[in-house]
Image (tube, helix red, strand yellow):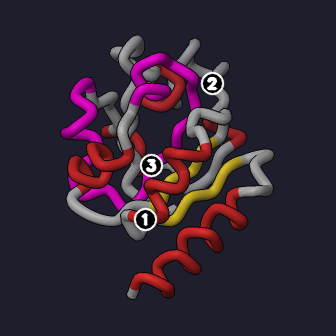
Amino acid sequence: MGAEVIAHDPYVDHWWEIEKQDSYPATGASLSRFFRNQEQLDGFTMVLDMAEALKGADGVVLAVRHKQYLDLDPDEIVNMAGGKIAVIDCFGILDDRKIERYFELGCEVKGLGRGHINRIKEKVRKRTLVVG
């Protein structure tokens, strides 16, 4: 739908459901008929290097609780992306300290089931106003 989707997972070399969406698991039995506007994903491939996957990214969706993702440092993510980034935490991967750091770096953070994120954002905003 207009976004360039790049995926990284340290344990997945190929995401067949997307890469071969018209023929996986078999021609005529794929799930592609349930999705629209995904024709441009024909050239999709997994990116094995996280820095390469994040280079120039506007956002990152954290969807799997792999140890490598739990250990990510917000400063490193922003550095790999090349600037401020939107972070969506779908699985409670970020602790409050990391969420706070993303806000300090000027990023936006959203998290499923994490209603208190706005309070962290407000805390950082108030602290920035007092300092600035």
Q: Residues within 10 Å of mark 3 (few under 14, many from 20)?
A: some
Q: Relative to 92, is 60 on the left or the right?
A: left
Q: Which residue is mark 3?
A: 60
**Residue at 34 percent of width and 65 percent of height:** 84
Q: Which residue is mark 2?
A: 30
The answer to whether 21 is drawn above or below residue 132 in the figure is above
Residue 63, percent from left and from top: 58, 34
Q: Earlier in the sequence, mark 2 or mark 1?
A: 2
Magenta-drawn stretch contains 64 = yes
Q: Which residue is mark 1?
A: 104
Task: Answer whether labels 2 and 3 touch (C-beta < 8 Å).
Answer: no
**Kind of element beneath mark 3:** strand
**Residue at 55 percent of width and 56 percent of height:** 37
Residue 98, percent from left and from top: 49, 45
The answer to whether 40 is drawn above or below residue 34 in the figure is below
Q: Residues within 10 Å of mark 2 (few under 14, many from 20)?
A: some
Depth-wise, is mark 1 or mark 3 nearer the camera?
A: 1
The kind of residue on which mark 2 rests is Ser
**Residue at 33 percent of width and 28 percent of height:** 46
Task: Answer whether labels 2 and 1 touch (C-beta < 8 Å).
Answer: no
Q: Earlier in the sequence, mark 1 or mark 3?
A: 3
**Residue at 57 percent of width and 13 percent of height:** 26
Q: In the displayed orientation, state which residue is furthest to the front.
A: 130
* Gap in angstroms between the C-alphas marked 2 and 3: 27 Å
